[in-house]
Image (spheres, grey):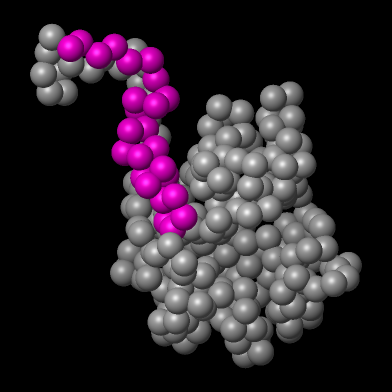
Amino acid sequence: MKAAILCGGRGTRLREVSETLPKPMVPIGDRPIIWHIMKIYAAHGVNEFVLLLGYKGEIIRDYFLNYAALAADVTVDLMQSGENRLTFHKNVTEDWKVTLVDTGLNAMTGARLRRARHHLEGDDMFLATYGDGVGDVNVTGLIDYHKSHGKTATLSGMYPPGRFGELEVSDGTVMAFNEKPQVSGGRINGGYFAFNRNFFDDYLDDSENLVLEEAPMRGLSQNRDLKMFEHDGFWMPMDTPREHSLLNGLWDKGTAPWKVWS
């Protein structure tokens, strides 16, 4: 099963670092947040990723193309040529298959998913999330729940700050999707989605301005075709300098709740 990760936004509220780095490459500890997100999925056996690139996507591309060289001590023997000139002093690898897709500089979230369709629709379902949120999400439970109800889509409902899309839910079915309401008291959309393959034809169009959290999500909820997987544990986006500092503090102290891998 594949997980798509939205990596193309500009991260304007985190501009202190996002002016030089795309937000998925902003570090928590010594690794970018996208690495942490992928480790969460991999802990649940999901190790095929489709990264939807846009703003400064070349930095993400270079990171994965040069993953071993960036993560290990390397000796470069300039007297040799070709691959033999490099000696890696630590075997740094992940059991991952990563597809890097340029989905356009200005495409919105729904358009980015649509443009990566040919990499995602080989299976009956796929997963998706944002490239800036970490949590101890039970991805295995999400997959099982999605398969159990037969609807087109599942999102994970969280309980953090009120600037995100609030959900109106009845018996686990999303009745309304309100993006970024003024006042929030219930669960919100934290990403960590599961979609059936028919989502592409039934809810996405070719518009570059298609925002996943607007017409597609509202269409799903109006059709009672969207379910919510309840997540009561830790979840936090890295959307502001304060959140960046909080996440790094948890990691540095060895108390990061999202570290579900050994």
- At x 18% / y 12%, what residue is drawn? 78
Q: Is residue 173 above or below residue 89?
A: below
Along the line of sight, which residue is nearer the eye, 196 or 56?
Answer: 56
Q: Which residue is pictured at 66% across the width and 48% down the height?
A: 14
Q: Is residue 65 above or below residue 46?
A: above
- Whether residue 49 is visible here, answered yes or no, is no
Region of the chain picked out in magenta, as a range: 53-78
Q: Residue drawn at (52%, 41%), measured in percent from left and top?
A: 20
Please state the horizontal and vertical placement of residue 2, each as a whole percent of the image: 42, 58
Vertical side of 111 occupied by 27: above or below? above
**Between 105 and 46, which is closer to the camera in this rendering?**
105
Q: Is residue 75 visible?
A: yes
- Left or right, 178 with respect to 46, comes to right
Closer to the camera, 71 or 182? 182
**Which quadrant would the N terminus be assigned to in this image?**
bottom left
Residue 186 is situated, as x and y percent measured from the top left of the image, at 84, 68
**Towards the viewer: 56 or 162:** 56
